Image (spheres, coloured by chain):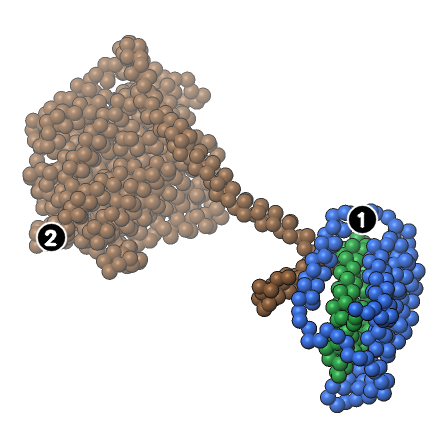
Amino acid sequence: MEYTLFIMLLPVLMFLFLGLAGHKLKPTLAGLLGTCSLGVVTILSYFTAWTYFTAPRNAEGAYGAITVFNFQWLHFTQNLHIDLGILLDPISVMMLVVISTVSFMVHIYSMGYMHGEKGFQRYYAYLSLFTFSMLGLVVATNIFQMYLFWELVGVSSYLLIGFYYTKASAVSASKKAFIVTRFADLGFLVGILVFGYYVDSFNFQIVGASTAFHIGVVSDAARVMIPVALGLMFIGGAGKSAMFPLHIWLPDAMEGPTPVSALIHAATMVVAGVYLVARLFPLFIEFAPNVLHLIAYVGVFTAFFAAAIACVQTDIKRVLAFSTISQIAFMMVAVGVCTSVNPHQGGLGYMASMFHLFTHAMFKACLFLGAGSIIHAVHSNEMSQMGGLRKYMPITHATFLICCLAIAGIPPFSGFFSKDEILTACLEFSPVVYWMMSIIAGMTAFYMFRLYYGIFWGKEAEHEHAPHEAPANMTLPLIILAGITVGAGFIPFGQFVSANGESYLIHLDSSVATISFCIATVSILLATLIYRKPQQPIADALGRKFADLHRAAYHRFYIDEVYQFVTHKIIFGCISKPIAWFDRHVVDGFFNFLAWSSQESSWSIRGFQSGRVQQYASAFFWGIIILLSVLLYVFFGGVCA
Amino acid sequence: MEITLQNVVFAIVAAAMMLCSFLTVTTKNILRSVTYLLFTLLGTAVFYFMLDYTFLGAAQIIVYVGGVVVLFVFSILLTRSDKNLNARLQPSKILSAAIAALVGAGVFLWCMLTHNFASQVAPTGEELDMKVIGQTLLGADKYQYLLPFEAVSVLLLACLIGGVLIARKR
Amino acid sequence: MEIQLQYYLVVSCFMLACGIFGFFVRRNTLAMLIAVELMLNAADINFAAFNRYLFNDALEGHFFTLFGIAIAAAETAVAVAIMINLYRNLNSIQTKDIEDMKH
């Protein structure tokens, strides 16, 4: 399986090549090179998945984890070392497939979307860098490698969000994304270090894999500290996956180009946190089930919070961003409600989460790319500039509708199956969580169809020239992704991915399925009722009645303002300013004092070199007198006249 | 206690020397200063005579009075300028110099007066024979000073050349 | 009453003190040289007095004084030559004018 190295190597080489020599190439050529290399990567990923999943299972009936290679890079102690390598196991192979597919689609799409933009080659270089980083993250053999690529992903995200670097809002958004995730990564790093100290290893083979494992004898102190470490590591994951309250960067990250939003902020980077929890899942189950359930509660709150905000947003990308936050929260909830690694007895959520990750990546990427083609057509992000577009953009309309139905959870689309598994897992854990998640699923259907009607139905807006359908290189990825969305629901996911590796057939719990279908249909009908027509009297009446709530939700419940307050008034005002004062006056003052005193003392002794002979003679004379007196005292002392 | 003529002469000469040396350093006019120096040097020569070192006294008069003082007078006259008379002397400078002098004098006096010298009284002076001086000066035996003599002559040569070189017209 | 050794020493000490005072006080460099002469003479008196009173048989002090006179004269000559040179360049032999280094 050594060819898997090329999956990693091709993107990074393409990044270096396009980054260094790209500006000398014609844009189209650079784009083609990037796309082709990613095509090769995609083929290799599919081939890897094929080889891996058709290979015979191991003794426990699971797919064994294969370490393709593992290179020891930095040694700390005998057992603690940072390695670089490629680990293949069910979830990493699945992620390889997801990442390479979505990235390939985005590469093709960007040929059309970014056509004529300044910095086209730079864009493709950054896309390759991102793909490389994300691929490295998922095949990490040890947690430090994951952290390394985690940071690289953050850097790529920063570069891509701030792609339009002349726009101040884009620059601020990229900084915000990087700083918030970096801040969360502090927790991640501390968690890694605590973990490594107590477990004495960083490697996933020993530490955790989706297959059964044993850590070995663990001391009592470790038993107390490992949950702490896992909790800290989750904070890092929460930052990347936009859990409340670290979600603030994701809506602003929409300043980047839309294909970037599709790739990074819908399908791949933001699921890194979920992937991390899945990677460490056996550890969570064995040592920190409470932390796992805490993750679930945070996920529930975040899902509700984001869904509420999404209901009132008017910018198409913001709606999709909050929808992403909500859906990732679904995945976190799914993995958080697990109570064991046995999928039949409380471990269903793991598989459900991974399944939803897979399907969500596909349809969310399709939604974002569709949004991109709409934005391309009307040259604006705001829903007020859209409306009635179904006449002009049939392909976009069809794919968008398919994906909206998928996200709402309507069979036979893939979203229905994956969401259903999540809801079943929640029900096994707690009815309260189940009903909360069902309501949120209803809200999801509602706001997605509000968006759908707002774009494709309703009153048409004024346009300079009639909107036209996107070119073929933009609609092709839409069609492909929509096709995957249609078919992915029928993949027997449980046969490939499950918490303990056992393959089992997914069966639908008919009561859960029926209830979720009904909730989804009711929400869609509600949205149709309110938003289909150009005049929206119910919506306006609701808006007037709940004006404050509406305003608060529109401003994302003022969380950003809270952050600003805390940062400026508390951190800057109470901590930074005194420290800055201290630094400037005490620390610098000390050195200024040293300089001043040496200057003063040198000024005062410069008189010794005055050039005045009599002064020299005087010093000479006094020296003689003193020496003489000392000598006289020493040798003839006591004899005073 | 009988007061001999020698004592009287000594007292007068000593007093004159002390007065003149004081005036040397306190007078404003530099030619007067040189003149007082002249008297001081003459007094020194008298002291040598009183110590029965007649050759030394003669040498003192010849070299110092006849050479050095004349040299001083010439140099003063050559380097005369009106600027010499300007600028008052600061009292602080005088005070500090006076203190230095007094302290110095104090230390040395204490040293000399509290020491028990082997002999307080001059032996009856017999005049030093010139022949002895000559042989000692140019003799090469122990306690004889041929080497220092030659050294001093070399020094004088060096000073001669040096003086000419330094002061020659460019 | 004999003239005691200390009397000579007191006189020479006074001359020395005057010489020290004059060296520190005077602004004219030639006046400083005059003060130096005073100090040298004081020392010479000391040597001669010690030689006569303490080491009557030996002649070290006598010759030391003799050489001292010779060397003092040579040194005065060189110093005066320097002063002449200085006067030629700076047109002044005041100590305040010779404070700066050559530039």
Q: Is residue A368 above or below residue A104?
A: above
Callout 2: chain: A
Q: Is residue A553 visible?
A: yes
Q: Which mark is residue B89?
A: 1
Q: Amino acid at mark 2?
A: Arg
List x then y, in percent, for residue B19.
Answer: 84, 59
List x then y, in percent, for residue C83.
Answer: 85, 62
Measure how far apart labels 1 and 2 are at the Cα level: 111 Å
As rendered, which of A539 and B52 lies closer to the eye?
B52
As rendered, which of A554 and A76 lies closer to the eye?
A76
Q: Which chain is brown?
A: A
Q: Residue A340 occupies which quadrant of the picture?
A: top left
Mark 2: few/some/many CA within 10 Å (<14, 14-19, 20+): some
Q: Residue at x 11, y 38 (%)?
A: A339
- Colour given to chain C in the rendered image: green
Screen quadrant of the N terminus of chain A: bottom left
Q: Amino acid at mark 1?
A: Leu
Which residue is the site of mark 2? A57
Please state if A449 lies on the left or on the right of A179 as rendered.
left
List x then y, in percent, for residue A41.
Answer: 30, 49
Element assignment for label 2 = loop
Q: Is residue A109 above or below residue A44?
A: above
Q: Which chain is blue?
A: B
